[in-house]
Image (tube, rainbow, N blue to C red):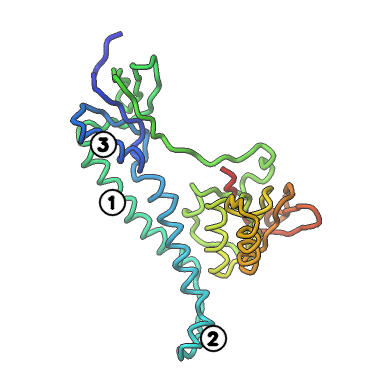
């Protein structure tokens, strides 16, 4: 098999992990190629920890109104929030972060960046499908840093058009009054708290008896109690869904609630 390019290391994925690997490979003075199917900008900057922190910050500002009065700040009862503007600001900041991360990938990899989808032909040969055709890369070693994608299980198919994931949540132009969250790991819990602090009614459900994968029973009890004050938690039971005229009905054990939108963050 004849290769179009031969390198020491092929890095598949130009996200946070891939860029870290790139730095190490460059320091080791190895020849390399970085392959990414796009878009550039890292998951963290585009749809992950960076925009979620903006949402948490905005939620903190809005939910701090009662505390402001304790420090002599008057008139807070007359404040109002326009959540569409809040979300617009989030997307604007997100785009700044993404542009910065994209520029780092472009400058770091330079001419050794190939935008395309990688497929292994053998342990050392990689076929990359690009907009202009296919290339064969021969690499003595590979680093796979291709990231992950949200999963929507088949049983949610009947309400699929009323579902968002972390890949699409930040693309909303406005937020609905009520949102359900399936999966209360780190991401689901973080977004649930942010949205609740922005004034949404949030129903969070998880098969696990606690949130965020906490295993210590004493800590779990305190966390459940504290966060349960900010958002409704349904823990330890399966959830089913029903389509309604305007949204989704969530059912879990003896619990039932209607929401406008469902955020699926189950992994």
In this image, 61 relative to 221: left or right?
left
Left or right: residue 129 compared with residue 222: left
Give the image location of residue 70, x and y in percent: 50, 88
State the residue position of label 1: 100
Can residue 123 be spotted in the picture?
yes
Residue drawn where x is 46% and y is 68% of the image: 58
Q: Which residue bears the numbered disc 3?
A: 24
- Residue underneath mark 2: 77
Residue 193, percent across and down? 55, 63
Structural crowding at the residue carrying mark 1, measured as other residues with C-alpha within 10 Å and reported as few (<14), some (14–19) or many (≥20): some
Q: For the point 66% across and 40% down, which residue is it?
A: 157
Distance from Cα at disc 1 to Cα at disc 3: 20 Å
Q: For this view, does 13 lie left or right of residue 7?
A: right
Q: Nearer the viewer, mark 1 or mark 3?
A: 3
Mark 3: which secondary structure?
helix
Q: CA distance from mark 1 to mark 2?
A: 38 Å
> At which x and y percent is residue 125?
34, 16
Image quarter in which the N terminus is found: top left
For the C terminus, the quadrant is: top right
Quadrant hosting residue 147:
top left
- The relative height of residue 10 versus residue 232 in the rendered view (above or below) is above
Name the N-terminal-most of marks 1 and 2: 2
């Amino acid at each position: 098999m004849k290769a179009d390019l031969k390198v020491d290391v092929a890095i598949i994925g130009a996200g946070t992990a891939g860029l870290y690997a790139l730095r190490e490979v460059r320091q080791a003075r190895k020849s390399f190629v970085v392959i990414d199917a796009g878009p550039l900008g890292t998951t963290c900057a585009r749809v992950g920890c960076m925009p979620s922190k903006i949402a948490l910050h905005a939620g903190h500002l809005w939910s701090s109104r009662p505390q402001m009065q304790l420090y002599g700040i008057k008139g807070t009862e007359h404040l109002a929030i326009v959540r569409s503007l809040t979300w617009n600001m989030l997307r604007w900041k997100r785009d700044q972060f993404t542009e910065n991360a994209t520029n780092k990938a472009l400058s770091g990899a330079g001419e050794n960046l190939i935008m395309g989808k990688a497929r292994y032909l053998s342990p050392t040969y990689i076929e990359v499908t690009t907009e202009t055709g296919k290339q064969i890369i021969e690499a003595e070693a590979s680093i796979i840093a291709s990231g992950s994608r949200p999963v929507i299980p088949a049983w949610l198919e009947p309400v699929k058009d009323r579902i968002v994931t972390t890949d699409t949540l930040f693309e909303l132009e406005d937020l609905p009054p009520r949102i359900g969250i399936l999966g209360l790991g780190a991401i689901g819990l973080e977004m649930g708290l942010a949205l609740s602090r922005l004034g949404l009614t949030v129903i969070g459900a998880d098969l696990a008896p606690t949130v965020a994968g906490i295993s210590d029973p004493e800590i779990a009890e305190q966390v459940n109690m504290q966060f349960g004050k900010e958002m409704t938690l349904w823990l330890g039971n399966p959830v089913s869904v029903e389509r309604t005229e305007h949204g989704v009905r969530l059912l879990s054990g003896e619990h039932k609630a209607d929401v406008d939108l469902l955020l699926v963050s189950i992994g």
